[in-house]
Amino acid sequence: MPATLFVVHGSHPCATVQRALELKGIEHRVAELPPAMHAPVAKLLFGRRTVPGLRLEDGERLTGSRAILRRLDELVPSPALLPEDEAARERVLAAEAWGDDVLQPVARRVLWYALDRAPTAIPTFQEHSALPLPAAVRPLLTPAIVALEHRLNRITPAGVRSDLLDLPRHLDRIDGWLQDGTLGGPQQNAADLQIAATLRLLMTMEDLDGPIRARPAGTLTLRVFPEWDGRVPAGTLPADWLRALQG
Ligand SMILES: N[C@@H](CCC(=O)N[C@@H](CS)C(=O)NCC(=O)O)C(=O)O
């Protein structure tokens, strides 16, 4: 049996790992878990309640996007997801860690906050989902999923406001890494995959799409992930909180 990647459809770290598997040509199937309800399943299978989780052909189980990418590089060294040069490698590892620890949660908080305000956008995130949930049942589950995600991600309006006010600073940092070559080289690296997946999820919100798309960070994102389900209409996020991004 090929490797199995356990995902939630549209999850950004899951997309990071899936793209790494594709780049390396590792045969795999994708097992999709229902959002929010995936946590107990992931905990049972991988000992940690988050996706992505990867079960390799020989049964080895891996969890966490960064740990999975490290193991994939050991198993299939080419194309490498980290540069050979020691200093460049350290820079990519630091950018990847920042993308995981700092940027990844920003997209979760802002998106689930937005989906609470615009629940009719939720089906657009399921367009290519393979979950055998009848369309009639999905709207019934939606409020519970949104509430659970708010709890899991400790979402508050003040927190989301400060995430959005900080976003221009985050984008400046990413553009700086593109300028110094840490990101955006001819061969996609681990930090490209980690950071672009989060930016792509943020770009599903029309309020954020334009300001990100206009930057080098947006160009990288669309190069790594041209397609992504989901569209949250403009005007969903409070205009006041977006001022820093537009200015
Ligand atoms: N940062 C870790 C964790 C990923 C993560 O938090 N995934 C979310 C989905 S995007 C999740 O499974 N959340 C469930 C929870 O927090 O219980 C990684 O990159 O693998």
Image (cartoon, grey):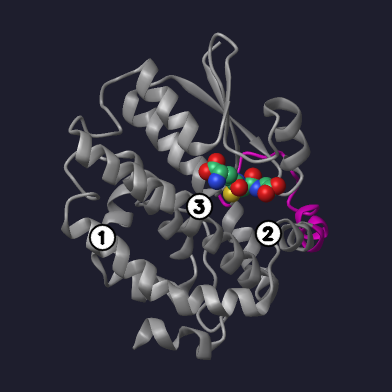
Is the shortest distance between ligand 1 and the CB of mark 3 under 8 Å?
yes
> From mark 1 to mark 3, how far is it between C-alphas?
23 Å
Question: Percent position (x, y) of residue 5?
Answer: 55, 29
- Residue 69 in the image, given as x and y percentages of width and height: 42, 31
How far apart, in angstroms, are the residues tagged by discs 2 and 3? 13 Å
Q: Amino acid at mark 2?
A: Asn
Q: Secondary structure at mark 3?
A: helix
On the rendered image, what quadrant is the N terminus found in? top right
What segment is highlighted magenta in the picture?
A: 127-144
Mark 1 highlights which residue?
219
Q: Is mark 2 within 8 Å of ligand 1?
A: yes
Label 2 or label 3, whichever lies nearer to me, is 3
The C terminus is located in which quarter?
bottom left
- Label 1 neighbourhood size at 10 Å, few (<14), some (14-19), many (20+)? some
Q: Can you give x and y, in whole percent of width and height, for residue 186 in the image?
A: 16, 42
Q: Which residue is mark 2?
A: 153
Q: Nearer the viewer, mark 1 or mark 3?
A: 3
Q: Front-most of 141 and 179?
A: 179
Q: What amino acid does circle 3 point to?
A: Asp
Q: Residues within 10 Å of mark 3 (few under 14, many from 20)?
A: few
